[in-house]
Image (cartoon, rainbow, N blue to C red):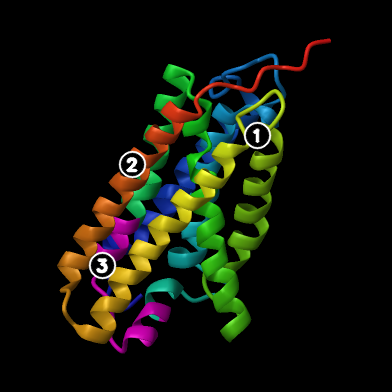
Amino acid sequence: MEGYSYFFNIWPWMGLGAAVVMLILLFFTDWLRMDLGKKRWKDPYWLSWVFMVCYMLHNIEEYGLYLTGAHNGFPDAMAVIFGQPLPEYFFLTVNFSIVWLAAPLAASLARKKKWPVLATGMAGFMMANSLTHVVSGIAGGYNPGLLTACCLFIPIAIWTYCACFGKGGIQKSALWWNLGIGFLYHVIMFGSILTEKFTGSLSMPLVTLILGLDAILMFWLWVILQKKWGTFVQQRRS
């Protein structure tokens, strides 16, 4: 924990508190459901809030307390890769732009406007993020975030694709675009980070700005995807 500010050390636990409240609302009320005629796990609007909970728990493993009992495992791992600690604002910008802005905005807007495709946007992001943890885990063993990526991100994203896409749900064509948008975010993210690492042509403030804009781009592409494939596939006539 040494070298990190008080806020940087407590923000993941703030997310944990929010996740607990959301879990109560998700499983013990109907406030976050859209279609009461469907089971919770088949409602894309309900799942859009589940994505937020998953990522808040993921942040606990990365920045709060990971398997060895240490704190801030992910920033420390990144410091090893880069040869020096990365600034706090880098990690805060990346996570707040996704977990505290893009994800809740997508969930709220999707429910308000009845936009099922927008509701599933975070599924593609989680699949792409989990792949980075899995590949890193295969190459070098456990990394902070690997456990929640494997136990939460991958199964819930796959379930979302099975439950919400196809006959009676979102058109399957939108599934591949959903995945592609999530991977595009990570390509831009790692591309800017590696450019700074190997060429030094980008400053860390600029890289951080790029990642903030990357989150805006991803959200904008979710909205475009909603506009293009925004209606449910018609139910098969009985």
**Labels 2, 1: front one:** 1
Asked whether, in this view, residue 191 is left or right of residue 235, the answer is left
Q: Is residue 140 magenta?
A: no
Mark closest to the chain's N terminus, 2 or 3: 3
Q: Residues within 10 Å of mark 2 (few under 14, many from 20)?
A: some
Q: Residue 88 carries which label?
A: 3
Mark closest to the chain's N terminus, 1 or 3: 3
Q: What residue does disc 2 label?
A: 101
Q: Residues within 10 Å of mark 3 (few under 14, many from 20)?
A: some
Q: How far apart are marks 2 and 3 (CA)?
A: 18 Å
Span of residues in magenta? 77-94
In front of the other: 7 or 53? 53
Kindly give the residue lying farthest to the right in the view shown.
238
Residue 88 screen position, x and y as percent: 26, 67
When asked about the image quadrant of residue 31, the answer is: top right
Q: What residue type is labelled 2?
A: Leu
Mark closest to the chain's N terminus, 2 or 1: 2
Q: How far apart are marks 1 and 3 (CA)?
A: 38 Å
Q: What residue type is labelled 1?
A: Phe
Kindly give the residue lying farthest to the top in the view shown.
238
Residue 18 screen position, x and y as percent: 45, 41
Q: How crowded is mark 1: few (under 14 residues within 10 Å), some or many (20 or more)?
A: many
Residue 109 screen position, x and y as percent: 40, 25
As drawn, 26 above or below 213: above
Q: Do the residues labelled 2 and 3 touch (CB within 8 Å)?
A: no
Q: What residue does disc 1 label?
A: 165
Residue 163 screen position, x and y as percent: 70, 35
